[in-house]
Image (cartoon, coloured by chain):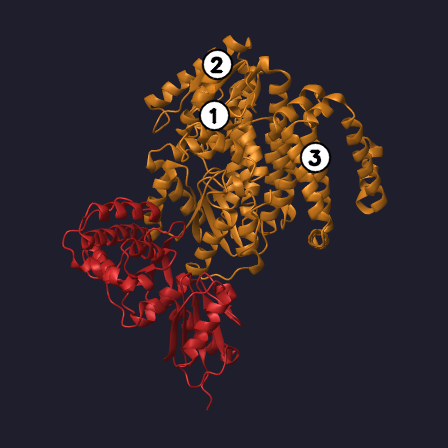
Amino acid sequence: MVTELVCGCDVGSTYGKAVIMDSTGAILGSSIVRSKMDPESTAQLAIETAGEEVEAFSSIGGLAYLVGTGYGRNYVPTCDLNVSEISCHAMGVHLTNPAVRTIIDIGGQDIKGIMVDGDGSVRHFSMNDKCAAGTGRYFENMARAFEMDLPAFCELALQSNSPTPISSQCTVFAESEVISLLAQKKRPADIAAGIQASVSKRCYTLLKTAGIEREVTMAGGCAKNRGLKRAMDRMLGFELVTLDTDPQLMGAIGACEFARRKALASKFT
Amino acid sequence: MKEETKATLKRALVDERTRNALLMKGVGAVSAYMVDDRVKAAVINKTVMKGVGKVGEFAAKASSPQGQAAFKAALDKNKQANLHDQWIDFKYWLKMWAASMSLTKVESGKTTDAMFRYPWILDELKTTHLAKTLARGRTGASKEALYRELVLTTKAAVEGLQNIITDPEHTVMTHDMIPSEITQAMGIKVFLVEAAANVIGLDDQHAPEKYLDAMYAQGLPDNTCTYSTQTPGMFAVDEYFKKASCLIATNMPCEAHFEGYSMMIKEMGIPTYWLDVPYNFHPGDPGAKTFVEDIKGMVAFLEEHTGKKMNWVRLKEVCERKNELTKMRTQLWDLNRALNPPLTGDALYYAYMPAFHLAASTQEDVDLYKRITALALRNYASQTPCFENIRYRTVMWSTPPFDYAGIYGWVERCWGIEIVNDMEEFGTAYTIDTSTPDTMLEGLANCWCDAAMARHMRGPAENWIDGLNTLNDMYQPDFILDMNHLNCRGYTSLTGFLNEWGKDHVPVCVCDYNFFDTRVVSRQGMRTQINNFMFNVMHADPLDPSLLEFDDSQAW
């Protein structure tokens, strides 16, 4: 019997993600690739890379259903449906951990606070897409100021017990402030922890707008930032739930689930 | 209108040759006018030349293959409308032009000079385009109502301009939301200071930018309401009137009026009277009595500076008209509670603007309301909704974006959303006791202090939330469309409150915008926010997916 494959592809500003499932909802393959200039190439590369892990995968055209999401969702080749990334993240997190009701999704270019119902549908959301403050780009800039790679910078904050306050929210101004603090010989770990604390404040404001209801989790690439997770735990006064699956894949998993449901529905109609 | 003219116009509807002949006659008249020396001199004006350049660009675009394709598509779209709608389109297209061009009817030399000295007046001519934009996709009652409302608004704006251009010595400048019943009763010529800002912002999304930047360059904080920034900006670049017999200023709409206008008023140096609304207004309390005294002061001030006397008999007539209007207005609110709301969105909003906000309670306002009420009742009787593909009912909370006047039509056609009422339109409706001068003034004080901006935006917050609760109970909307004006400090803080309120009531779609500045939030930016909400929270499918994203960043 030929396995019917469905795929969700999340074309983000910094990474493209793809997930391939069979009709039972089992994840057979996934990928995370660095975004290229052209979102169509990013999508193609992400899907083909995920396909390499799936024996039954032959080509993009052979997929039973393909859902695109993320800022480049309109450019996913042979896409059957586009779904907003807010709905996809909500669904992806719901599948991974149904107890979660609030999600903070930090992507490369924006932050979203999402409140989810018991069935994975969105109840409220709030988003910041006008400013890079607190996004993946922001952390990349900060790591550059520290002359470190991103994973090392994220770990650095864990060595601090006394964060240095960072007053600037703007990515550009904050970078200048950090350079000044480094020049003043402040402890790099404390400055890094201060940066994580300032981002957590920003996230908290967005979450408050969307509504905070436990359990709360973080999704998106920045959810892997342990320094930020610790700062968020402190800000909220309780621990964020850690997802079993790679949090960066939540949008693609949600998109894939929508694809699976659509494929099943089309069989019965 | 002469019988012969009527017959020609009727023939023009069906006969292309007659249409072309009429058009050529119009072109001939314009050519003859261009021979005038004054016009020639004005044409040398740089701003005007820039405009001419734009016309050239437009002509080049129109003659390109894409331009021709767009023109053909527009023609095809028109063909789809029924004969009555096409007639309404044509009739009011003519009326709009007639209303706009009537500016030069009185003392054409002075008015033509003013048109070239203050180039924003030429933006008035884009009103016909605005009317077409708003009427797109509309049919029946809403189409006719919209056109009638815009013709009336244009006439009122043109009358004000004629007053200030041809007879500034006997014209009083008034801010938005001054009780215009008083000036009507006194027989005073009036020019509404914000008329230009209202008109050009609606007509062309980019027209206000020059004036906003001029004020920011002079040091006004760039988070000041763009409504209150634009008019002083015109003054700052020397494109505004400096002469009038006197000025009546107010803090009615919001506190930004103080900030934006103080420089302008100082520079103008004309006698000024400040009519200020008390905070937390309640009829009968000491604040209300003080406001009545303030209106009496305004009457005395006007008598002193214009030589006109208050005519209490005429005021009684005006107040009775206001009562009649209020009755019809509340009837329209009630009709929209029906499952198929008969007259909604901008068809409701643009009736309120001239009749209750700008040039209140004239006989023309009453005639307009009578006609639109009749149209609404006809729809109601036949259970015809204002927009046939209605899927969602919403209440628009806050002021609609003037830099995207077409948003009402877009939400209808893209998502099937019907805006059954809005914060500006929905004010408290008082009936004025016309038995004595004192009761009339008291009634007017109640009406104006409780008008939408004075009541909802000046606070306290309970006024705002009470209004929202009332509308929510009245209409049971599927969601609230919260237009969050980013340069309104009061409103942005209330949006946080609204978010919390929504969690216990109905979903809230927050759409950030800036009243007159699409550089802050573009039209597509507004659409994207609404799209996000509709997809993610309402789980809706668009009626017309081609309208989800399109580029109108350079459109008027």
Find residue A55 and report its horizontal and vertical position in percent. 42, 86
Which of the chains bears the disc numbered 2?
Answer: B
What is the secondary structure assignment of the residue under circle 2? Answer: loop
The answer to whether residue B23 of the structure is visible from this angle is: yes
Q: How many residues crowd mark 3 within 10 Å: few (<14), some (14–19), many (20+)?
A: some
Q: Return the mark for residue B432.
A: 1
- The colour chain A appears in is red
Residue shown at 73%/45% (left/top)?
A: B87
The answer to whether residue B176 of the structure is visible from this angle is: no
**The disc labelled 2 sits on which kind of residue?**
Gly
Q: Write down the residue under mark 2.
A: B269
Find residue A8 and report its horizontal and vertical position in percent. 43, 72
Q: Nearer the viewer, mark 3 or mark 1?
A: 3
Q: Which one is nearer the viewer's eye here, B21 or B504? A: B21
Q: How many residues crowd mark 2 within 10 Å: few (<14), some (14–19), many (20+)?
A: few
Q: How many residues crowd mark 1 within 10 Å: few (<14), some (14–19), many (20+)?
A: many
Q: Residue B76's quadrant in the figure?
A: bottom right
- The colour chain B appears in is orange
Residue positioned most to the left: A161
Of labels 3 and 1, earlier in sequence is: 3
What is the secondary structure assignment of the residue under circle 3? Answer: helix
Which of the chains bears the disc numbered 1?
Answer: B
**The disc labelled 3 sits on which kind of residue?**
Trp
* Apparent side of residue A29 relative to residue A78 in the rendered image (left or right): left
Task: Give how far apart the Cα atoms at labels 3 and 1 are.
Answer: 37 Å
Q: Write down the residue under mark 3.
A: B97
Task: Give how far apart the Cα atoms at labels 2 and 1 are.
Answer: 36 Å
Q: Which one is nearer the viewer's eye here, A226 or B368? A: A226
Q: Is residue A262 above or below residue B375?
A: below
